[in-house]
Image (cartoon, helix red, strand yellow):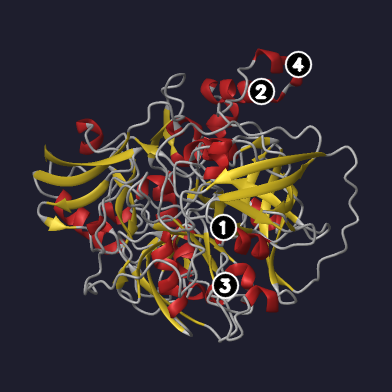
Amino acid sequence: LCCECGQFHLLLDNHLYNFQDEVDDELICHICLQPLLQPMDTPCGHTYCFKCLENFMQEYNFCPMDRKKLSFQQCHKSSLLVRNLLDKLIVFCPFKAECQQTMQRCELEAHLQNRCPGFKKYRSELQRKKNPISKGKEDPPTKVETNTLKDPEVPSGGSSLVAESSAAAVVSLGTAEPGLVNPAFEETEEGESLIQKCNYRTSLVAETTTIEIHREDPEEELGMRIVGGKDTPLGNIVVQEVLRDSVIAADGRIAPGDHILEVNGVNISSVTHCQAVVFLRHPGPVLHLMVLQEKGFSSKTAQQDSTSATNREVIHVTLIKRDRSEPLGIKLIRKTDEAGIFILDLLEGGLAAKNGKLSRNDRVLSINGQDLRQGTPEAAAQIIQTTESRVNFVVLRQPGVQLSDPVEDGSTSNNSSSSSSSNGGSPVHHRRRLDQNHYRRKSNYQKGYISHEKTVAIKKEPKESLGITIGGGRDNKNKLPIYVTSVQPIGCLFRDGRIKRGDVLLSINGIDLTHLNYYEAVSALKSNAASHSVILKALEILSLNSTEPSLDIKEQGFSWSPLWITWLGLPSYLHCCQDIVLSKGNLESWGFSIVGGFEESKGNQPFFIKTIVPGTPAFRDRKLKCGDEIVAVNGVPAIGMSNSELIPMLKEQRNKVTLTVVSWPGSLV
């Protein structure tokens, strides 16, 4: 809570105030649409808030109003007269329940610190929460109930590879890094499998790390955006972006693409997106995060096996495939400090998860009688691929490591796994290229959310404002539609009550807002607000899951923006696609992994980028992000494809590929 304005906002954002009267348009910042704070004049005669202009100039080099060339150094403080007029605007105390006073804006901070009973009550409650003596009187922190046991510690380091998995396919094109082929092997002219010639080559290395984050202010946000969750094809919680000048950025150890496995000892690898947001937004001076980090490729040779099997249990498990192409749903890794192969994860709905006898952290000793004590995930995948029916595992288990609960029986996908080789997998169906910006798919594949279009007609006074603030715009780096960030307590829309925070604005008085940039939308809203009647069309995104935590309450300390998962429910006509062109050498991998695609049990799901490997073309390009949705490859729509269809298509692209993607901003924590 800001001690100057008494409201919640980002540290780098402007203060927020509830003004008693309508403020003259000449005193409004045309970036934030709020009365000016620390006003700055431009050489071209426009005035903006200091922070608004500073943030804007970090991305653009022109004036927001007339688009004339501009640098921040050319701007200067507004006159003392203007600043005094702004400071004398009358505002309400934000603690309306306990204090109904009004005062000049410049007097609010002193009022809060010395006279306001509401702010005094807030501070005493905050102090009581921090006091260990009264800790027992508090409600315990929310705990997420899941049907899975807490994961054993994920092995420290290793080659994070997917064996026989249609749920996570690492894209690599028959290259020098067999570990990224997910795995796909091609026969050489001598009939020898490629893996037998590539054991000395590089492999993908990932490590788990426990990171301790310290915050001087326990309420301060971490400053990163996340995607994923068990209710999405991504499964894990993945860092999409680290914000500049944030707590996480200052620490420097967490990077985009990291997978967050635990928060303060609580396993979040199998929680929903909303539940993960709640855990990561929970206040506290110290935060312990366990993360899985891709380290790129390593040519380090496997060490000799010096691990004793003393006090460990040897377990025999048999899995039966219906046909050769059926995936087992096992993620295998290789540790950097110990030879052999280890089970990192069992994918939900796969044969291994249903069988329930294999467990995370099991070391694979042999498959179908072939010794893998010095083996690699690639070798294990090849054995599994060539097996027609019965796959016999012998694994070594640490004492005390429990089995995961078996997944209930249900229909399983029988599409071929993404480990199919480019000349032996499912055929690629050639589809007509679509010459359009929007690739259509069902908007409600994300079953937790639905979108509802509504029309709001309002009669108003000509000088009465709409009373909303907006975000988004097609000039935004994510090319978002215009959406409502707040409905102010003054204005006709607050009185009407039908337009809510998070609504996507489609049109005003027949003027289409869906293709406008931010400033064009502001201009359209302001000009139409001057009329006696306003007709707004908006799209409301509704959650169907009543058991999800209420983020309206949980996010009080955070500058509001829609959750990543709610964007997934938008209809395709609101998607703004962009083409990303990647180029690589003959001996390189593209360097990203994908999840999603058609499965019989789940139907059509979008393809998402799950991992971007350091040092690869996708990483160097910097445009592709974790959580991006792939809608087309070289102009061919991906809708309706299975994982094992899209992988060969990507493998066919030798040195250049064009990915058409939709990028939604991750949820801020």
CB-based contact (under 8 Å), mark 4 and mark 3: no
Mark 4 residue type: Ile
Nearer the camera: disc 3 or disc 2: 3
Ranked by sequence position, the earlier of labels 3 and 2 is 2
Ranked by sequence position, the earlier of labels 1 and 4 is 4
Residue 144 visible, this angle: yes
Nearer the camera: disc 1 or disc 4: 1
Residue identifier under label 2: 129
User: In the image, residue 539 lies at what x, y percent?
Assistant: 23, 45
Dot 1: within a 10 Å radius of its alpha carbon, few (fewer than 14), some, or many (20 or more) residues? some
Residue identifier under label 1: 387
Q: Is residue 151 above or below residue 663?
A: above
Ranked by sequence position, the earlier of labels 3 and 1 is 3
Mark 3 residue type: Phe
Residue identifier under label 4: 133
Left or right of residue 162: residue 298: right
Q: Is residue 49 above or below residue 279?
A: below
Mark 2 residue type: Lys
Dot 2: within a 10 Å radius of its alpha carbon, few (fewer than 14), some, or many (20 or more) residues? some
**Label 3, label 1: how far apart the Cα atoms are:** 15 Å
The residue under the point 30% across, 59% down is 640
User: In the image, residue 406 lies at what x, y percent?
Assistant: 56, 32
Q: Nearer the viewer, residue 618 or 489?
A: 618
Left or right of residue 536: residue 551: right
Q: Secondary structure at mark 4?
A: helix
